[in-house]
Amino acid sequence: MSDKTADRVAAATPTHIARKVRGLSDRAIAWIFVAPTIFLLLAINIFPLIWTIRLSFTNYKANRINREPEWIGFRNYERILTDSDIWLNMQATAHFLFWTIFFQVLIGFTLAWLINKKFKGNDLWTTIIVLPMMLSPAVVGNFWKFLYQPQIGLFNYIIAFFTGKDPSSFEMLGSVDLAPWSIVIVDTWMWTPFVMLICLAGLRSIPDYIYEAAEIDRASKLRQFFTIMIPMVLPFLMLAVLFRGIENFKMFDLVVQLTGGGPGSTTELTSINLKREAFEKWRTGYASAYAIILFVTVFGLASIYVKALNKVKER
Amino acid sequence: MTYSKLVGASALAIVVAGAATSVQAEDLTLCWAAWDPANALVELSKEFEAQSGHTMNFEFVPWPNFADRMLNELNSGGKLCDLLIGDSQWIGGGAENGHYVQLNDFFDAESISMDDFAPATVYAYSTWPKGTPNYYALPAMGDANGWFYRKDWFEREDIQAAYMEATGDELREPQSQRELLRIAQFFQGREIDGKTVYGAAIFTERGSEGITMGATGALYAWGFKYENEPGTYDMEGAVNSAEAVEALEFYKEFYETATPPGYTNAYMGESLDAFKSGQVALAMNWFAFFPGLYADPTTGGDKIDFFVNPPQNIAASTLGGQGISVVSYSDKQDAALEYIKWFADPEVQAKWWELGGYSAHNAVLNDPGFVESQPFAGDFLVAMEGVQDFWQEPVYAELLLAMQKRVHDYVVADQGTAQEALDKLIEDWTEVFEDEGKL
């Protein structure tokens, strides 16, 4: 049937067009299909990247259109890498990154393990747990700001209930010691469900017969956990860590809503600092160098990580 | 005339009439911050619409995002705003980067004299380079940072007695910064009508300009200067003078001992909320909010009174307020200039004050009835005599963000000393001016 249709179409095609079509090689047709995508990729990703690299060697300021940018070599890079304040931002980012991933993996995996057990209301609990993930980070940041409010905030009252402290005696967002943890708590609350879902997918991909075989071999539950469950879920878990790592490295909205980078610069993550340099101070050249440094860092770490992930998958 | 000629002539007449109408009636957009005076301006502008036939549209952006939003608009050559009431610090950038239309010729042609406006406002809102007769804005909204307090609490005999016992002084409007702190500390954690109240709401905001605007209230009163000689960018010994260090230490003490818990990132809105909810005895904020505060049914009227930022070594207040400029990217500059001409009229200025805007026109300010017209009017005049502003350089944003960081790091995050904070601030500012080729 389809052959007949094709024959009819071929017969109906004017000769000069048919000749042209016949003249195109498979490679040319492939290029025709791929070309729009490549063009978009070049226009949207590659060109801005190259342009950013170029700007990073200048003192260009986007708000000073009348001033000719000067080529200043590696001075922006040198300034950034020797600026102690930027290293403090990097430390704040590392603290945020490490602890959010640590807690999200720990709690996310535990929740997935619990949800994976067959019990009544399983689906309802899954839905309830994933709710925070569906909210907008700006909304989450705003309402946690209220929860952390020392005089009326529920969070302070809950802590006060368990510790006997006065609720207004501590400030989660205003204290230099507590503010970095306050953003870790909120991000963990919001994104643990994401890690849980990925872990759940991993757990459900383990065929039952493997556990059954282990049971027959009289392997204990603990041994099953460490020799079956963990190795088989590990690629999924590593993928979740990769996603959360990249996301949290560029964390902006949630933290801006919660602390605005304060108190002082305690929670000023690199992305917040970069935004201030680029769009508040308008140091475009400097901010470009900053962005390139961050890009290389994330790209480098992610590449190493993906290689490790592939090795784990190959095992 | 044949039928076809008649139709052609009619069509031409319609086109010409349409074109004439479109020249006369424009859709103008005025951009400003979203706050009480903006609502008053909407009301006021209805008169302009009726007179001119132009339609006024308004783009009001909340203060924390105002600078970001509007400076992005200007830097990208956007046509959103035909008229912009931009912050005083933007005047340098607005002039040097070509965002604002220079108004000298227009003022001359329309006989608008800058001598008709309060000198401090002309200097701060209109001129660039500072103090030269190059005008890029018409003073639109005079403003300064002032204080207000719970008059009803101050007048209570039990509270007055307790204050006398605690300090040995009479409870009154503070005459110095130190007295201000003493009063705020007295109220901190005090039980009034069964409710715990706190001393004062001050500015501690980190993201935009809050803590700088608050801390400069103390710095200026101690005699802080940006430069040893104006225009030299010579800051060593001025910015980090002994007086400046003392003032910054004072502001930190104020924050630590006399503000409500959790008051770590507070600006205008938070100050108003703290006062209106009966949480604090005193609060700092811009005069622009005072009409609204006085009209507040809960804490306004007889319960509130106002005072100028108290002096310490000198009398000085932090300048607020803005001038109105015509955006150079606008296609409707003629209509926008028409609005400025109308706005500069003394009668319109009088109505502007009546509606809640702060006119800077001498005809309004020097009117014999002005001081009595509002409970804060006299304070406003006093404040405007001693106002000082932040840098108005084209790179003001870099300078401001550096100060936000250094002051917040010291005052709120308790990192380092006041001396270190100001020394680092000089380093930051020096780097900015070096990049600009001014040092």
Image: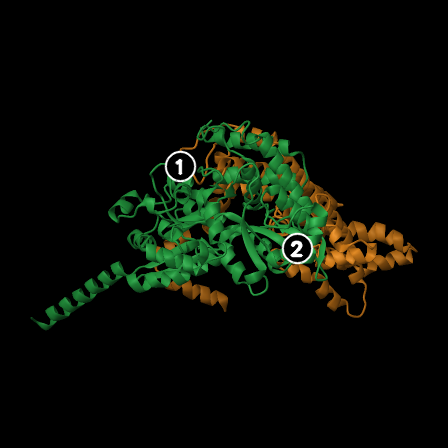
Is residue B409 in view from this perspective? no
Q: Which residue does the image show at 47% across and 57% down from the upper left?
A: B374
Marks 1 and 2 share the same chain? no
Discs 1, 2 touching: Cβ within 8 Å: no
Which mark is nearer the camera, 1 or 2?
A: 1
Is residue A118 in view from this perspective?
yes
- Element on which disc 1 rests: loop
- The spot of residue A197 in percent (x, y) is 71, 58
Q: Position of residue B65 (x, y in %)?
A: 51, 51
Tell me the kind of residue under disc 1.
Lys
Farthest right residue in view: A218
Rendered location of residue B324, percent (x, y): 38, 50
Which residue is more in the foreground, B31 or B298? B298
Marks 1 and 2, how far apart in space? 42 Å
Q: Which mark is residue B28?
A: none
Secondary structure of the residue carrying tag 2 is helix
- In the image, taking residue A236 as reference, residue B346 lies left or right, namely left
Mark seen at residue A145: 2
- Count numbered badges in the picture: 2
- Give the letter of the chain under mark 2: A
Crowding near pointer 2: few (<14 within 10 Å), some, many (20+)?
A: many
Q: Write down the chain letter for disc 1.
A: B
Query: Identity of the amino acid at label 2?
Result: Lys
Q: Which chain is green?
A: B
> Residue, x 85% and y 58% (percent of image)?
A211
Q: Please, is residue B394 above or below residue B81 in the view?
A: above
Label 1, on which residue? B130
Depth check: B74 or B240 in front?
Answer: B240
